[in-house]
Amino acid sequence: MSKRSIERVLDEYGAATTGSFVERSEAVSSEKLLGPFVDLFPPPPARIVDIAAGTGRDAAWLSQRGYEVAAVEPVAALREVGMNLHGAARIDWCDGTLPDLAISPAPARGFDVTLLSAVWQHLDDRDRARSMRNIADLTVAGGLVLISLRQGPNAPSQTLYEASVPATVDLASANGLQLEREVRIESMQQADRAAGIYWTWLAFRRLAR
Ligand SMILES: C[S@@+](CC[C@H](N)C(=O)[O-])C[C@H]1O[C@@H](n2cnc3c(N)ncnc32)[C@H](O)[C@@H]1O
């Protein structure tokens, strides 16, 4: 994906902070999204990074469960929204953009769980390859990587790319990530459901290096 394409996506999310995006994001149940995987998580206080954290809904939910959570979000306006909405939760908010994922401030060590909810559709194949390598590097051996793939109409578009489950599993495997679970989750936003959009969640285990 060209730099301009990533910038276009981030501009759209920056502008979305004044629309219904924040309300719609916060209306999604983290319990329903992450519930099918919590038995794979290490017990708290393990370290979790939520990449492309948006409003911090899932970061806050995980923090409330006793995890040490870093929320990486490139859009400053969204980080601000998240800090205001979830100020009571202990979350380390960081700047960072896929595929390079130069997280600022840099984490002192790797993460036990790396979460990517609803962002893979914004990356093209080349950036997915670089992103997967960096995600694997960020995750400790034995750690968990969770990625959701948007499935359904309206992709490709200027800012949306189709995501195939087999291609993602192959890419992950080439980077030392072994598929442990695949779950289909219906879209929680009524309009998306009506449009036939659903999400395939993939859970990978980071193999020893
Ligand atoms: C659909 S929202 C999902 C937010 C949150 N993870 C959730 O599930 O509600 C997509 C998020 O991806 C972020 N994003 C888009 N492109 C990105 C990139 N190249 N690197 C990191 N984050 C990106 C956006 O700023 C936005 O917060």
Image (cartoon, grey):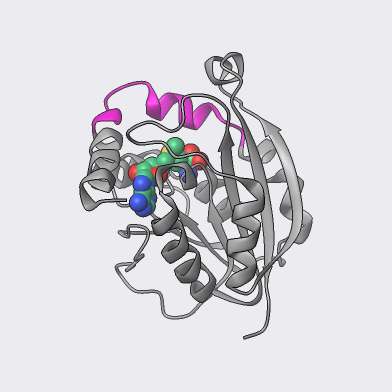
- 32 lies above or below 94: above
Q: Quadrant of residue 51?
A: bottom left
- Frontmost residue, 105 versus 166: 166
- Frontmost residue, 192 versus 14: 192
- Which quarter of the rendered picture does the C terminus lie within? bottom right
Q: Main secondary structure of the magenta part?
A: helix
* Figure quadrant, ligand 1: top left
- Frontmost residue, 106 versus 158: 158
Tell me which segment is drawn in magenta.
15-29
Q: Locate residue 143, reporting x and y percent.
A: 65, 71
- 72 lies above or below 139: above
Q: Quadrant of residue 103?
A: bottom left
Q: Locate residue 127, reporting x and y percent.
A: 39, 57
Residue occupying image coordinates x 53% and y 27%: 27
- Frontmost residue, 126 versus 105: 126
Q: Quadrant of residue 8?
A: top left
Residue 144 belongs to the span the image colors magenta? no
- 108 lies above or below 145: below
Q: Locate residue 204, reporting x and y percent.
A: 68, 62
Residue occupying image coordinates x 40% and y 58%: 126
In the rendered image, is residue 54 in sight?
Answer: no
